[in-house]
Image (spheres, helix red, strand yellow):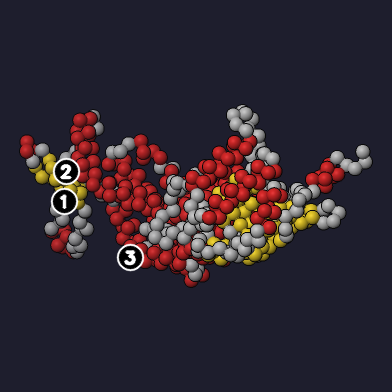
């Protein structure tokens, strides 16, 4: 039994290796805010959401496969939550039988497996009832296969048969075991036997010919410890095989519930996030992913989902059409929303590539073979290296992991030195990245660097600017425009220090 709700033909691996730059992504994209919103206090959903988002799929079919499943989840949230709660309940109830782990004797293994299987059959029956009642409401391939599997494998005849076997294995009529005598009159070839149903005889025949006992019996005194021990050993040898089979069956069903819970945990996180964004009136949409070799990046109403989750006000959104572009340079006024805009680019890319909806009215982008961030950092408190050394070291680490069709987001990088040197370093790095067919977003105050690319009128580049009104107010809108020589730092001075002195 398989869930297949994250991939078409493989399980979702919670231990799958994540990108080497995962900590940078978490820090620069403020992903903990996203994961906490998805988890709503549930540590398991937090872990599953983190694993899914950071895995960053590159396969279009899998992305669309998950999108369709998520659409079903949004359309049938109450049913999906019920399925998830059943899987969680099975695991919680299984853990209550921890005492069965204290011993591996066949007797204990059998008892624990019987108890677990009774629980699992009850929950499997619940899932079959859900499938029978609601399967027609789901359209995605993933849920269609899951419900069809439950309906096929959990027929009435199968469930009745299992329940009958479980009752018989409680051995309320005693345990019937056959054996052969081996060398030294030692028993071997122990076989657990099924009790025969008594033959029905009526009238005088039953009185005249009573049924023979199924086996000869002898009794052991309560004080005969050796005899009791020998009898217990005989019993364990007889039930050993069936105990192992039951334990394997129990483990198999538990693994199904565990995987069902794991894969649904991601979608539960998506439902939690959707509910919070809906309460704030923020739009979402399902993105249109394109092949990594294409250069597509356009959206309407894109906003920073993490900012939306942390402030009461409605966040400012942005539009962009950067199709057929490899380089996007963003300049403009200080505190004009450039970093927030850059973060919205990275967050939407990660959300798209794990199969989620995105925080936008419309979003289309090619998938990337890896997302990397190079954001400015605080000064090294240990003074082990200068700030420029640290920036170049991080850039070297990124370069070691880059492949064609990756995406790199730069936020005020290489500004730790003077304008001329910083611009030259940035120019050489960006030119090298573009030659390797890597998409670049670059937020900068380095005018020489930005204008140098603008002046070349490169067709594959687009230049954006943080909008500033004539009175100095920021709209936090990012518009298309050529780089300016000033970042309007005097606006901040006048606002903070004042103009009276």
Which one is nearer the viewer's eye here, 49 or 340?
Answer: 340
Question: Residue 304: in sight, yes or no?
Answer: no
**Residue 87, labelled with which disc?**
none
Whole-percent x, y for residue 83 in the image: 49, 58
Q: CA distance from mark 3 to mark 1?
A: 32 Å
N-terminal of the pair, mark 3 or mark 1, is 3
Q: CA distance from mark 2 to mark 1?
A: 9 Å
Residue at the (65%, 34%) spot, across then down: 379
Mark 2 in CB contact with mark 1 (< 8 angstroms): yes
- Report the residue marked by disc 2: 217
Q: Residues within 10 Å of mark 2 (few under 14, many from 20)?
A: few
* Element class at badge 2: loop
Question: Which quarter shows the N terminus?
Answer: bottom left
* Vertical position of residue 102 compared to residue 472: above or below: above
- Report the residue marked by disc 1: 213
Which one is nearer the viewer's eye here, 410 or 268?
Answer: 410
**Residue 157, labelled with which disc?**
3
Q: CA distance from mark 2 to mark 3?
A: 36 Å
Whole-percent x, y for residue 318 in the image: 70, 60
N-terminal of the pair, mark 2 or mark 3, is 3
């Amino acid at each position: 039994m398989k869930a297949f709700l994250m991939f078409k033909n493989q399980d979702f691996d919670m231990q799958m290796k994540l990108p080497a730059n995962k900590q940078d992504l978490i820090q620069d994209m403020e992903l903990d805010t996203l994961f906490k919103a998805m988890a709503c206090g549930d540590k398991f959903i937090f872990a599953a959401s983190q694993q899914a988002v950071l895995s960053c799929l590159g396969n279009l079919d899998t992305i669309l496969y998950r999108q369709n499943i998520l659409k079903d989840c949004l359309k049938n949230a109450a049913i999906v939550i019920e399925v998830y709660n059943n899987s969680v309940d099975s695991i919680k109830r299984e853990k209550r039988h921890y005492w069965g782990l204290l011993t591996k004797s066949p007797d204990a293994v059998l008892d624990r497996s019987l108890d677990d299987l009774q629980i699992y059959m009850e929950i499997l029956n619940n899932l079959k009832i859900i499938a029978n009642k609601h399967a027609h409401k789901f359209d995605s391939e993933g849920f269609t296969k899951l419900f069809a599997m439950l309906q096929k494998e959990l027929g009435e005849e199968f469930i009745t048969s299992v329940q009958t076997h479980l009752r018989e294995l409680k051995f309320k009529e005693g345990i019937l075991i056959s054996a052969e005598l081996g060398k030294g009159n030692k028993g071997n070839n122990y076989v657990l036997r099924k009790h025969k149903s008594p033959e029905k005889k009526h009238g005088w025949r039953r009185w005249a010919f009573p049924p023979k006992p199924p086996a000869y019996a002898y009794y052991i005194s309560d004080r005969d410890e050796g005899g009791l021990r020998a009898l217990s050993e005989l019993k364990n040898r007889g039930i050993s095989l069936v105990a192992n089979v039951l334990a394997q069956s129990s483990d198999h069903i538990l693994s199904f519930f565990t995987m069902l819970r794991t894969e649904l945990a991601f979608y539960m996180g998506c439902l939690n996030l959707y509910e919070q964004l809906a309460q704030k009136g923020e739009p979402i949409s399902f993105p249109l992913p394109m092949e990594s070799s294409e250069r597509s990046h356009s959206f309407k109403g894109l906003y920073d989902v993490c900012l939306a989750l942390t402030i009461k006000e409605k966040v400012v959104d942005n539009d962009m059409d950067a199709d057929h572009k490899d380089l996007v340079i963003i300049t403009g006024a200080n505190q004009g929303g450039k970093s927030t805009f850059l973060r919205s680019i990275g967050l939407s890319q990660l959300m798209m590539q794990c199969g989620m909806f995105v925080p936008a009215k419309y979003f289309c982008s090619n998938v990337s073979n890896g997302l990397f961030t190079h954001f400015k950092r605080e000064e090294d408190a240990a003074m082990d290296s200068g700030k420029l050394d640290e920036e170049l070291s991080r850039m070297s680490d990124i370069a070691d992991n880059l492949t064609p069709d990756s995406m790199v987001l730069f936020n005020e990088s290489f500004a730790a030195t003077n304008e001329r040197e910083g611009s030259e370093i940035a120019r050489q790095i960006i030119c090298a990245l573009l030659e390797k067919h890597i998409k670049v977003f670059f937020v900068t105050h380095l005018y020489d660097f930005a204008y140098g690319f603008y002046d070349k009128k490169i067709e594959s580049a687009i230049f954006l600017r943080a909008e500033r009104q004539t009175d100095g107010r920021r709209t936090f809108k990012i518009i298309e425009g050529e780089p300016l020589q000033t970042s309007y730092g005097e606006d901040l001075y006048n606002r903070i220090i004042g103009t009276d002195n």
